[in-house]
Image (cartoon, rainbow, N blue to C red):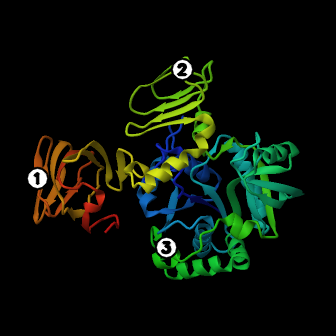
Amino acid sequence: MLIPVILSGGAGTRLWPVSRKAHPKPFMRLADGKTLAASTIERAAKVGSSEVTLTVTSRDYYFLTRDLYREAAPAGDHHFLLEPVGRNTAPAIAAAAHWVQERFGPEACLLVLPADHLIRDQEAFAAAVAAAAALAADDWLTCLGVHPTHAETGYGYIRAGRTEGGGQTIEAFVEKPDAATAQRYYESGQYLWNGGMFCFRAGAILAALAEHSPDIAHGVERVWQATATRAEPVELDPASFADLRSDSIDFAVMEKARRRAVVPVSCGWSDIGSWQAISELYEGDSHGNRVSGEAVLVDSRNTFVQGEQRLVAAVGVDDLVIVDTGDAVLVAGRERAQDVKAVVDELTRTKHDSAVHHRTVHRPWGRYTVLEDGQDCKVKRLVVRPGGVLSLQRHRQRSEHWTVVSGQASVRLDDQEFTLGPGQATQIRVGQLHRLENRGEEEVHIIEVQTGTYFGEDDIERLEDRYGRV
């Protein structure tokens, strides 16, 4: 049995301002209108040997991922492992192997896929997966290695050896090279890009971890023993998981193991790791300019513009990346597109909200959009999906005024409950218990006006919450 295991935890900081901590790279929509996460689950569903998939993510992304899967692959049997903190890929894969082994036995194979990569040739990918699964069934720790299309310094490499089944043995893993070394690797024909895609039996990877990284192996066993492993979703024990050493599966196992193999593949793969990679998904004009959204470029060349909410105009510029999300604008030289992470580091250091949130923020019950954020008030548009329920909460530093725009809103204020329709409103005083619920079959839209001295999200005191956020 082959179980796709999707790892979804990276922040994608090099794709700011579209990718942010609260709504990261897997949920970005690309040129075809799909998110990377949706494309990954569709791809996984086609190569797995059953409808079962397992995604390792965090509670912050669980509800958004679950809803996205229901839309993209509604027939799938989707399961989730929720990490309390990030500890890189080795602990995540070890926990996934325990989950697979517990349900399907040690002979079942994991197909490990990042949630935020792009693959254009699905047939070539499926053929490579079949070859990798055959090797894995014979106790090889297997990965997919991508034939390089150019000398790339942003990827790790795999040096392939002798032919073994449908793949080759692995002679060495090589870290990201400098430009001259990357060119030598490319010209030699012996090296493949390490795409972070793996296939191995659950029992085999757990045994390899015990041999080569016993602290991680024993630590994850303790996590598993302290976790309610039959829950849906499975929330890994926070205290013991936080004690784990952070390490990648490459360093923890693959670079040390003896029985390891790689299946070479050419499948139109990209890790979509920079705005340069994003721009290549769009067709260029006669001057090499590429545009997503509405833009006017005059006397400009080799420039990429992405505008989400308004017109972007550029005059007399060359070799730039310009990204406008409505609440933030990025302007970078094309050759410096890999350095956008430094912007996020600075925003994080100064605790700027744009490092984390977009103007529209997704929540388990729906979403809200910030319309105005002033010193004396904050205005939001709340959209509550059918069946959505905000937590029972109160605020210490602000009051709120709700006006229903559409739908029927069920409201609780302290011990009083009532329904508001379009055009009706209610006031929530400082310290007053309140909750909003949509019991209907259409979305409820609310305009919320906050007044007071502080409007941060940490002024929410949750007493009850359907989504486990208390």
Q: Position of residue 81 (x, y in %)?
A: 51, 67
Q: Position of residue 337 (x, y in %)?
A: 59, 40
Q: Residues within 10 Å of mark 3 (few under 14, many from 20)?
A: many
Sequence-earlier tag: 2 or 3: 3
Residue type at mark 1 is Gln
Picture layout, residue 230 above or below residue 3: below
Disc 2 to disc 3, how far (Cα)? 53 Å
Q: Where is mark 1, residue-wise? A: 427
- Measure the alpha-carbon separation of dots 1 and 3: 40 Å
The residue indicated by pointer 3 is 236
> 2 or 247: nearer the eye?
247
Left or right: residue 293 compared with residue 452? right
Q: Can I make out residue 394 in this image?
A: yes
Q: Quadrant of residue 97?
A: bottom right
Q: How many C-alpha atoms fall within 10 Å of the one at disc 1: few (<14), some, or many (≥20)?
A: some
The residue lying at 29 percent from left, 51 percent from top is: 386
Q: Which residue is mark 2?
A: 316
Q: Specify the amino acid type for callout 2.
A: Gly
Q: Earlier in the sequence, mark 2 or mark 1?
A: 2
Look at label 3 and name its amino acid: Leu
